[in-house]
Structures are given as C-alpha cells and as structure tokens.
Image (cartoon, rainbow, N blue to C red):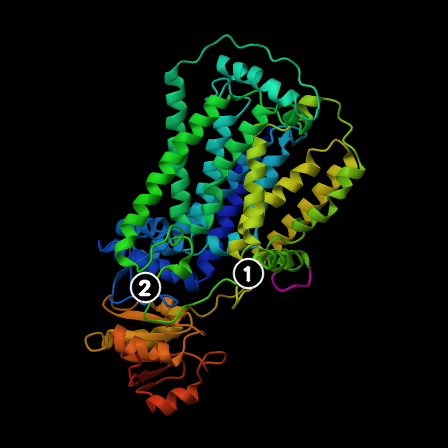
Amino acid sequence: MRVNNKSILSLLIFFLVVLRFIWLLKNSNYLHIDGAYYTGIARFVADGLGLKTNVSLYHKAYPDFPYPTSVAPLWPWLLGQTARITSLEWASKYLSSILWCLIPPCAYLVGRSYFPNVKWKGFSLSGLSFALVFATQRELWNMGGRPYTESLSYLLLLLFMLSVGHCISTSSKKDLLKPSQEFYLFRAMSSRLSSSLPVLGRSGKPSVDKTLHPASHLLKVVLFGFLLGFLSLLLLMARGQFIVFVIVLPVFCVVTLVLLLLPNLALYLRINTSSVSAYKMLALCFGYLIAVTVGWWLWLSILSPYFADMSLMAPIRFDQNRASWVLSDHQVLKSTSGLWAYIVDRAQGFYVAFNWGAGHAYRRAYYVLPYLVLVLPVLFWIKDRDCDQSTRQWTLEQLFFFIVACAGFFSIHTVHKVYEAAWHFDRRQGLTSIFFFLFVLILFLRHKDKFVRGIGLGFLIVTVVMGASHIFETIQRPSTTTDDRRLAPLITYMNTHAETIERYAVTGHVSQRLSPHIDQRIGLHWVHRKTTLKDLAMMQCELGVTHLVTTSSLKGYQFSLKKLQDKLGQPVKKHKRFKIFELDMPCIK
C-alpha cells in the first residue's frame, strides 16, 4: 500500500476522533465554568428568546432578566440552533468536539499551503507539524471537549488564513492579485523614489505583462476583500480576543504597498512581491474595510440600547460592558502611570512566559516548543548553504503568516490582570501564540543544514510526545463528580422557589454553572472577590436582589462570613455545600 500525505493525515484524524470521543464518554464534567455560561445563553436561543442571559457577570448590573448579552454571540447562537435540532445536552457535549476534530486537518492545509517547500521524503513536513502541534496543544484539547469558543474560533481562524493565502498565493495560475500592466507602471514610477534612498540591493527589471486587467477585475478583488472582511467579522463574533487578527490584513496590505514602493527594500528582506500589484492590494483592503466597518457599526447599534456606555472597544473589553453604573467599577487589567511604566510592566511578562518554573509559563501548555525561540541564534551561527534564491525568498503569504504570528504572540503579552491568573500564557487565551511558535519551528525545518533541521525535529517530537501523554492521561483519569450533581440541591431549591425568589446574588463562579439548569425567570448577580458590602446593598435596593448565596468560606473576599452573619443574621437555608441569606441592608445613596 502506498503511503502518502493523505493516508497519514487520514490515520491521524481517525485516532484523534477516537481519542476525543473516548474522553467524552468517560468525562461527565464537561460543562465547566464558561461552558456552562455559553450553554445557558444557548438555552434562550433554542427557546426562541434570542441571545439573552440570566447571569450578570462582574459588575455589569443588569436591571432585569433575561437580559441581552454582550458576549461574542456566534458560538452560543450556533450552540442554541444545534440544540433546536438535537437537544441542549447533546449540543453542549458533542458540537465543540466535532469542530475540534476539523482543526488538525485545517492546520495541515495551512502549513502545507503557506510553506510548501518544507518537505521530508515527499511528506509535507510543515503540514504535519502544524496538524500535530494543534492536535496535542493542552488547552485546545481540554477546551475542545467542552462547550467553549476555542473549537469554533480557531477553526474559523484557520479557514480565514486559508482564504487569504489562496488570494495572495504566488503559485495560483488564476490569482486574484496577479500583477497587471499598471503594476509595472507603478514599479517604474516608484523606482526613482527608491533609487534616492540608501541602496539595499539591486533588483532586476521585471518582464512586462502585456495583459491589461479591466476594471471589472478590480471589482472582483473588492468583492473578495468584502468576503474576507465578512469572514473576519465571524472571527470577532466568535471570540472578541480575535480583534488582533481582524486588523492583520490591513497591516499586511500597508506593508506590501511599502515593499512595492521600495523594491530594493523587498530585495534586501528577500520578500518576493512580483505576484501582486498596488492597485489590487488597495482594492482588496478597500473591500475588506467596508465589510468590517459596516459589521462593527451594526453590532454596536444592536447593543447600544442595552448598555450604559457602548464605546468603540466595549464589545471587546468585557469588563467595560455595563448595563448601568449602579455598582462600583471593576478593574481587570493592571493599570500603569504612563507609557514607559506600561512597557516595563508588560515586558516583565516575557520572563514569566519563558521561565520553566513559573506558574503561568508557556511550557505548561506548549511543553518545550516555546524554548525553540531561545535557540534562534543558531540560525545566525550556521548559515543556510542553499544557493537557490527561489527557496530562500519569502513569499507574500509567508509575510502574512509572520504578521499573524507576531500579532497573536505580542497581544497576549499585553494582558496583565490584577486578580486570579495574572498572565495567560498557559491558559486558553494564550493559544494565540501558537502561530509564532510554529513560525519559529518552520525557520528550523526549512534550513538546509541537517543539524539545524534536527534541532527543529527534536523540539517537535518532544512537544508532540508530551502533548500525547497529556491526552492519554486525561483519558485514563477517572471522571470527577459533575457540577450538576454537586449543585443539585441548590438548583432544586431555586427552582422550587422560583415563584417567590427571582433575584439572587451568588459568590464565585457558581452563577455560571447554575445558568443552564435553573428556571429562566431567575436572575443571578455574580458576587466577585472585589464586590463590597456597599455593592450588595445596591444589588438589594436598585437591582431587586433579595437573597445571597454563598458557596465557600469567602476567604479573599471583601467581607467575611462572620460579617455577613452579623449584618444579615442566620441563613434561611443551610446545606453542606451552600448557605442562603436573606438580604436586609440599609440602602446607601
């Protein structure tokens, strides 16, 4: 039997599907915190009530329930629509896993299409590397089996990258951005400007393409850019963090135009720009920006009636979405006194990210792969002996991949929180760095020196083995008690008293976990560790909260359990897992 890329990829997908569904069958605790929150929203969608929630996170101060949610809507909407066809339980348990199984093959296609020359004995080493790293990444595996946004959002991101790569591919005979006569006229006009700048190299005269593309072709490029803009909006609707990937295409267009204007700079950087024209890049960017601008305006206009201050970035900064300012402000990101202080503070994160012993280091999610960055000086020490300039040049789609990689990597280093996980390098938010580490891996794998390629292969093999061992460990691990069973007494109490008690304040993450199971008339306000007794009083007086649910000792909170008992008396309901107090506090204006 002949073994090729397709057979190896098919075998990989088969094993991943088997492993994923073995994990699902053994693990009954699949909702978790945010997964339960999305499932709660999906329940309203499935019932035809729209994108609404019965949970007021942080200090959003929702005045009534169910209330329109500002969370990225695509995943809970898809979850709810699927629940209409199947059931909410089936959709929340299996839909994310089905989408996760599509990610490794899409990653394979991205790796193969962006780096087609990275091969080993006829196999696409770049494609297989991408597929294996995505398949064994710890956080993507963990969240891919739960109703979280990761499976959908990263699948859309890979499809977006495939679409952009197809658009600017230098190997396509029917390339939308194939250069036309006006491109060479533009190059000729710009040559005078570039010749006046410091000489970085010599560029040969391009052969003139006598095929003149009509205006209808430019319109086709504009429409393709519009479609890419629509796809990027889906990214944003799936995950607000992906705003960094929405802006990479305009940045790429600007960088490409600069390289077209300065061909000597492109030659110095070894970037091949012969496959595009300036007019086509402008047309692509124009169509893209129209779609993004119109879509963003529509989203803001839909949400603005329900929130107190819908600024331009409000849908992205979840801590800024406030239905009212009844409750005190809630700081999520660490603030600094100025630009220099900001740079110094965020730069400290690089030490945490690459410190093997740090609690939030990259190695917890990516194992040894991030440390390939520290071995980069080897590439400067051992020069690439390949004399074929065509394989040493970087194509425009590889330039786009590099911009995506840098955007994902550096954006996660801007997130420094003041509570819980200070840095997100080892968490699911840190998944955006995966493209940066893969790009560094490609630098080693495309090198012609066997020793350098061996370093890259060594890091790849160790990373995949460690990731696979984590997967088998999670499969063999006995299933924990589900949140549903632990919270069953509280759920029963709330549903039994739904006619008389409609507003609760709930400590910790319990409000999200309760959301899919309680009566839809009940509203829950999250009591965070930063919530004060004054906020509790405002919840009672302004937001109609009548009872407080505590599910822990309140260690680390602004108030203790003893203080609550002094102010509110004994709980009206006691259980080994929770206590319910009736709020009776003086209103503070």
Q: Secondary structure at mark 1?
A: loop
Amino acid under label 1? His
Residue count near mark 1 (Cα–Cα under 10 Å), binned few <14, some 14–19, many ≥20: some
Asked which quadrant contains residue 488, the reply is: bottom left
Tag 2, which secondary structure? loop
Q: Residue furthest right?
A: 381
Q: Nearer the viewer, mark 1 or mark 2?
A: 1
* Magenta region: 356-360
Q: Nearer the viewer, residue 376 or 349?
A: 349
Image coordinates of residue 3 in percent, x first then y, are: 60, 31
Nearer-N-terminus badge (1/2) = 1
Q: Which residue has dot 2 on it?
A: 516
- Quadrant the N terminus occupies: top right
Q: Which residue corresponds to mark 1?
A: 416
Residue 48 placement (x, y as % from top left): 22, 53
**Eyeballing the image, is 81 above or below 105?**
below
Q: Position of residue 498 (x, y in %)?
A: 22, 74
Residue at 31%, 50% (x, y): give it: 77
